[in-house]
Image: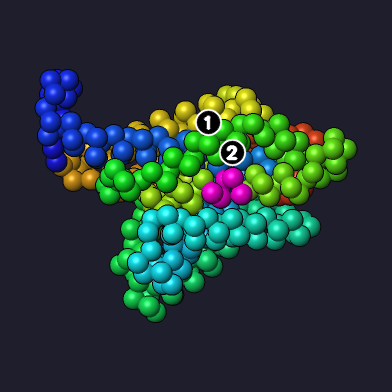
Amino acid sequence: MIDLTPGELLAGNFEQLEIFIISRLPRLLAILCTGIGMSVAGLIMQQLCSNKFVSPTTGATISSAQFGILLALLFMPASTLWSRAIFAFATAILGTWIFVWFIQRIQFKDVVMVPLVGIMFGNVIGGITNYLAYKYEMTQALSSWLVGHFSLVLKGRYEIVWLTVPLVVLAFLFANHFNIVGLGKDFSKNLGVPYNLVLFSGLTIAAMITASIVVVVGSISYIGLIVPNVVAMYKGDKIRGTLVDTALFGAIFVLVCDMIGRIVIAPYELPIELIVGILGSLIFIGLLFYRLKHGRKAIRLGSAGTGCCSAVPNLKGGADQ
């Protein structure tokens, strides 16, 4: 570990300045883009599906992106990072679409069953990925994308995450359309909003954000699930009103988790997936129990209409509609 000091950087120390430009600055930018991107992707999926427990983690998006990376490694062993990203984009978008298509055709569903179905679907994709990796001896090559970490982020190897910036801006521009679609198909048609087009466009944006991060950083769970829920407790559920706060809180959350991972067993480093996974799983379990216990008193996406993944009132004490 090499310590950088502001004094040495300002004094023009060439060695420390080179380390800062090649390693430290790219890592910081990747952390910020990861926090912003995963949080906004989760917010979009929750809004479109009218379910606060849908996210890239529980919607099979991350697992699908990993499957695409494996396909790139199998069919294009000498593929570049951008080539792997194209495969990851395609499979992440397809996997997310299949998940939502399947959920739309389940007549009776509650607020908890939807993410559980997504988790099971993601595990099926993950099982296929692991099977192919073992069969073709690609386990070691794939391991870098199974656990999220920033230790390999260097200049020239992380720029794909910059795609999150225009995608987040695009999500902000269409935020009102996402709100309308989240209220249901009939409501959208009455207002002249093309339901299916906006739905799958929003899911595509979320999937591309997730895939661009997974290709560079690896799998980081729960950010897109936890951050939007925490922000919604204070800012409400209107996506345009919460998107900026969600992005900022997500960036801070990932930055803090990365700092914890570097401090706990310094000078060694824990993968950020481990830190986020521990904190996120505990908060996720707490959210599940809170929804089961309080029903309608829980944070809701809207009070009118039903979205593609919205719940029917069959939980004890009432559930969201």
Name of the residue lying farthest toward the bottom: 135
Name of the residue lying farthest toward the right: 190
Q: Residue at x 59, y 38 (%)?
A: 43
Measured along the vertical axis of the image, is residue 216 above or below residue 106?
above
Sequence-wise first label, 2 or 1 = 2
**Dominant secondary structure, magenta:** helix
User: Which numbered circle lies on residue 43?
Assistant: 2
Residue ID for mark 1: 246
| 50 left or right of 271 in image | right
Q: Position of residue 134 (x, y in %)?
A: 37, 75
Measured along the vertical axis of the image, is residue 178 above or below residue 273?
above
User: Which numbered circle lies on residue 161?
Assistant: none
Q: Observer-nearest residue: 315 or 174?
A: 174
Q: Observer-nearest residue: 214 or 288?
A: 214
Image quadrant holding the N terminus, namely: top left
| 139 left or right of 318 in image | left
Q: Where is residue 46, by image quadrant?
A: top right
